[in-house]
Image: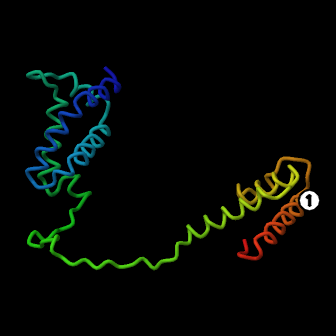
Amino acid sequence: MSSTAVNNYIAKRYDRWLDYASYHCGLVGISDEAHDVLNEVLCSLLQKSDRLLEKLLSTKKNGYTELDFFVLRMIKLNVTSPTSPYQSKYKRIPADDNADYLRMDIEDVPDNEIDTPGITLERMHQVREVFESLDLSPLAKRVFEFHFFQDNNFSEWVGPESQKQLYEIYNGVQSLIKQKLSGEFIF
């Protein structure tokens, strides 16, 4: 038997174990956490030694394997015990059961933050649009794309051009773009 056999068995039994986890999670009021509980149990299970897992899989009783019983015990333990690995790892936020959230007036606060990533993206689109509209040589296009759009250093450039030549080409293209954008922004 191999770890592949264990993985195949887990895949085969997953839905039934999930039903069991859903049932027990429902009993304690956390029915939406059944997937999390089961996955936490399986994560813990798969950290056990291959020898133990193969032994649990090969020991059968009443049409089930010891692996089934082990997983079911771990699910129930993780759902019900406050000191279980799942309960310790994922603490619940206490809720006020007496509050009627439908009747609460929730203030709709406008978002006044500046969308810096959005502004940057818009500017990049403007630079790209102007860049593509310029009648540049293939070398000038490659140099500007390499340094500006791909954010590479000229020390990584593969070609016969010196770094001084590359910077001169880059600065020339940058100057053309700035002129075309009429000084809307500096990059």
Residue under label 1: 165
Where is residue 82 shown, x and y percent of the image? 14, 57
Considering depth in this image, is 116 or 11 the residue closer to the camera? 116
Above or below 126: residue 79 = above
Residue found at x 11% / y 52%: 80
Color encoding of the figure: rainbow
Instruction: Name the image quarter holding residue 28.
Output: bottom left
Where is residue 160 shown, x and y percent of the image? 91, 48
Above or below 91: residue 86 = above
Above or below 147: residue 18 = above
Tell me the element at label 1: helix
135 left or right, relative to 23: right
Type of the residue with mark 1 = Gln
Residue found at x 87% / y 47%: 159
Considering depth in this image, is 82 or 181 the residue closer to the camera? 181
| Number of numbered tags placed on the structure image | 1
Above or below 161: residue 67 = above
Residue found at x 11% / y 44%: 23
Instruction: Name the image quarter holding residue 17.
Output: top left
Where is residue 32 shown, x and y percent of the image? 20, 51
Question: On the rendered image, what quadrant is the N terminus found in?
Answer: top left
175 left or right, relative to 23: right
Query: Could you classify mark 1 by the number of other residues whose Cα lies within 10 Å: few (under 14), some (14-19), or many (20 or more)?
Result: few
Instruction: Name the image quarter holding residue 48.
Output: top left
Where is residue 42 shown, x and y percent of the image? 27, 40
